Amino acid sequence: MRRIGRYALLLFVLAITIGPFLWQLSTSLKGAGEDVYAPDFVPSQPTLANYAGVADAVPVWTFVLNSLFVAVINVVANCVGASMAGYALARLKFRGRRLAALVFASGILVPFEVILISLFLVMRSFGLTNTLTGVVLPGAIAALNVLLMRNAFLALQPEVEEAAVIDGANAWQRFVRIAVPSARGTILVVALFSFMFSWDDFLWPLVVLSDPDKYTLTIGLAYLQGTFFQNQRLVAAGTIIAVAPLIVLFISLQKHFFRGVGEGAIKG
């Protein structure tokens, strides 16, 4: 009886988490004559015309390229910047190291909405509003990623680094040749988190961008919703276009992702 209850709970959780996505996928594949509100997940007249309709009516691929540009730059900046900052906090000895770690930890607790206006004023003073550079900069080195990398580098055995010091390796050589290879799993987690955050971000691009040619995909989806409000099939097709890269990326990297999460959690 207890086992039946567990399976029932598992199916319930699965239904409320995966169900809306399957409903959107089914809606995006339904033909013009089908009822999008009917409770069936298998279209009787499946078609890809809705995806072609979205691409023909709005510059969705321009939105995708803008989002891809922002996401790739964010991934590179976070992997490099967070790794260097995390290594300094974990392995280098300097005055104020604990205070710096505390500042990074405190940064996670501050809601983004609190600093939104001041951040926009800073971007405007540098002339970066309505640019993709202005979209990238606030998330270029996230505090959470710095702390993840710090924990990963703390797990590195001190004897290994001490042996490198005896061999004459300086801090940069120890970072590149010993620390980074030992934390590849966590770096992959940082890359995945950075990609997901920048790809899904809606509020900051909405504030800083005003030119439709520079819209990211999340802003473009809101544009789709207004344009095709009466056609839920096209809205669903646009949603699937936005979600598909994240699903493919996670499925292809899930093995390394879960291993990297455990690697970063050895010392918390």
Image (tube, rainbow, N blue to C red):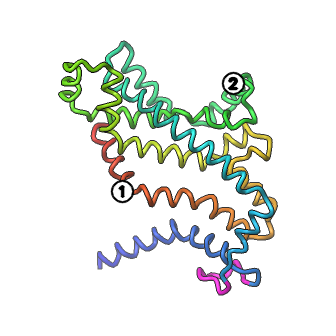
The residue where tag 1 is placed is: 255
Q: Is residue 19 above or below residue 224?
A: below
Q: Amino acid at mark 2?
A: Val
The residue where tag 2 is placed is: 122
**Mark 2 or mark 1, which is nearer the start of the sequence?**
2
Residue 109 seen by the camera: no
Dot 1: element: helix
Location of the N terminus (image quadrant): bottom left
Is residue 40 rendered magenta in the image?
Answer: yes
Q: Is residue 196 above or below residue 76?
A: below
Among the 4 quarters of the image, the one containing residue 221: bottom right
Q: Which residues are magenta?
A: 34-45
Mark 1 or 2: the one toward you? 1
Residue at 62 percent across and 36 percent down: it is 136
Mark 2 and mark 1 in contact (Cβ < 8 Å)? no
227 sits left or right of 19 in the view: right
- Count the labels in the image: 2
Among the 4 quarters of the image, the one containing residue 40: bottom right
156 sits left or right of 31 in the view: left
Location of the C terminus (image quadrant): top left
Is residue 170 rendered magenta in the image?
Answer: no
193 sits left or right of 4 in the view: right
119 or 165: which is nearer to us? 165
Dot 2 surroundings within 10 Å: few (below 14), some, or many (20 or more)?
few
